[in-house]
Image: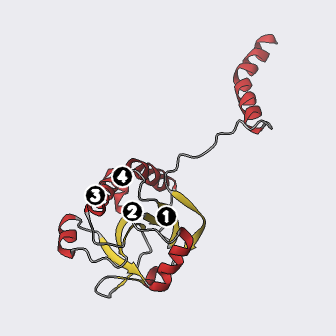
Amino acid sequence: MWTLAALALLFFGPMAVSMWMYFSADGWRPEGSTAHGILLAEPLVLDTGAWVTPEGGAVELAGKWQLVHVVDRDCDVACADALVASRQVRRALGRDMTRIQRVLWLDGAHPDPESLAREHSGLLQAAPSADEAARIRAAIGPAISGNLLLIDPLGNLIIHFPEDTGMAGLHDDLKKLLRASQIG
């Protein structure tokens, strides 16, 4: 009898103590999160058909995860470094890299299209309509140049990564998100 009680205490005791610590009034709950991006409180449903290429062609952003670089100046050294880093992060995802499309949002910038095509094959250059850009700025804030935006395959803007987000943090967030996601 005592042996059975000792075995039950050995197996169920740690679980009971951890539940008491988690639900107690003292609040032993962990604080913060491991996320590096900023999750929008309410996803912003985008009009993914409102994006156009610099030549004026329509772009459909639905169907894949979209990692959008926001650039409001010509692609300087910091911009080029961010593009290289995001390319490496995408490649580091391994088999999941095909689920992500990289997009360069040209917000008044005019980078050299030939060098971008040469150095970043597969990088889509597009910009939202003025109304769509205003909606995005209202959701995130007016100063979004240098940020990375993450759009899900259904066309919802869900996360933005500030310019100072490290690429290791971006990789961690994308890896966790793609592992948990059943779409795109």
> Which SS class for mark 3?
helix
Dividing the image into 4 quarters, which one contains the C terminus?
A: bottom left
Q: Earlier in the sequence, mark 4 or mark 1?
A: 4
Residue 84 sits in quarter? bottom left
Q: Determine the residue located farthest toward the bottom in the rendered image.
A: 56
Q: Nearer the viewer, mark 3 or mark 4?
A: 3
Q: In the image, what residue type sits under mark 2? A: Arg
Q: Which residue is mark 3?
A: 81
The CA span between labels 3 and 1 is 30 Å
Q: Residues within 10 Å of mark 2 (few under 14, many from 20)?
A: some
Q: Position of residue 87 (x, y in %)?
A: 30, 58
Q: Earlier in the sequence, mark 3 or mark 1?
A: 3
Q: Position of residue 128 (x, y in %)?
A: 42, 80
Q: Would you say the residues marked 4 and 2 are in contact, meaning their CB atoms lie under 8 Å apart?
A: yes
Q: Position of residue 86 (x, y in %)?
A: 33, 58
Vertical order, 24 against 39 (above or below): above
- Please say whether residue 24 is visible from this viewpoint: yes
Point 51% across, 80% down: residue: 134
Q: In the image, what residue type sits under mark 3? A: Asp
The CA span between labels 2 and 1 is 9 Å
Say which mark, if any, is on residue 74.
Answer: none
The CA span between labels 4 and 2 is 10 Å
95 on left or right of 2? left
Point 55% across, 59% down: residue: 39
The CA span between labels 2 and 3 is 22 Å
Q: Would you say the residues marked 3 and 1 are in contact, meaning their CB atoms lie under 8 Å apart?
A: no
Q: Which residue is mark 1?
A: 183
Q: Residues within 10 Å of mark 4 (few under 14, many from 20)?
A: some
Q: Which residue is mark 4?
A: 93
